[in-house]
Image (spheres, rainbow, N blue to C red):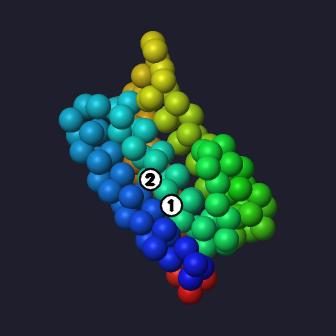
Amino acid sequence: MRAYEQEIAANLERAYQSILAAKELSRDGFYDFAASRAYYAAFYAATAVLLAEGLEFGKHSGVIAAVHQHLVKTGKLDKEKGKELNWLFEMRNIGDYGVDAHVPAEDAQKAIQVAEDFLGIIRLLLQKKQ
């Protein structure tokens, strides 16, 4: 964990900032972008905990697959949290790339809550590793 200490801290800070941005975007009615930022909060948190395991990935798909392989399957992370990360990724894809599809306000709000919960659990996992 020590080798990646600065990167872990930077990713956690980006996760926290992404949640704040998601809340602001949602408050202003930008639900597609709020959902995207919520996903990125979870993505940065996932990246941080994987770095603590000594694992680095360059692609979103690699991070998500590693969360399932190294955290969900080993019981370090609840299966439901793995499913929620997948759902956040779907919301991000709609928010960022949906031509005619858009993220509804209620899904944007749910995405923010899911991302906040995910970040909280990742923080707990990281504290256990110290």
* In the image: residue 25, left or right of residue 59: left
Percent coordinates x, y for residue 20 in the rendering = 29, 53
**Vertical placement of residue 84 versus 5, above or below:** above
- Give coordinates of residue 118: x percent, y percent: 51, 59
Identify which residue is drawn at 27% across, 39% down: 25
Residue 41 appears at what percent x and percent y? 44, 53
Residue drawn at x 50%, y 70% as measured from the top left: 8
Residue 15, placed above or below residue 24: below
Q: As shown in the figure, which amino acid type bears the numbered disc 1?
A: Ala
Q: Is residue 70 left or right of residue 40?
A: right
Quadrant in the picture for residue 122: bottom right
Q: Is residue 112 visible?
A: yes
The secondary structure type at the circle numbered 1 is: helix
Q: Which residue is mark 2?
A: 41
Residue positioned 48% across, 68% down in the render: 7
**75 left or right of 108 in image:** right
- Asked if residue 66 is positioned above or below residue 26 in the image, the reply reads below
Q: Amino acid at mark 2?
A: Ala
Q: In which quadrant will I find the C terminus?
A: bottom right
Q: Which mark is residue 45?
A: 1
Residue 127 vs residue 48, the one in the foreground: 48
Asked if the residue under mark 2 is in contact with the one under mark 1, i.e. CB atoms within 8 Å, the reply is yes
Callout 2 crowding tier (Cα within 10 Å): few <14, some 14–19, many ≥20? many
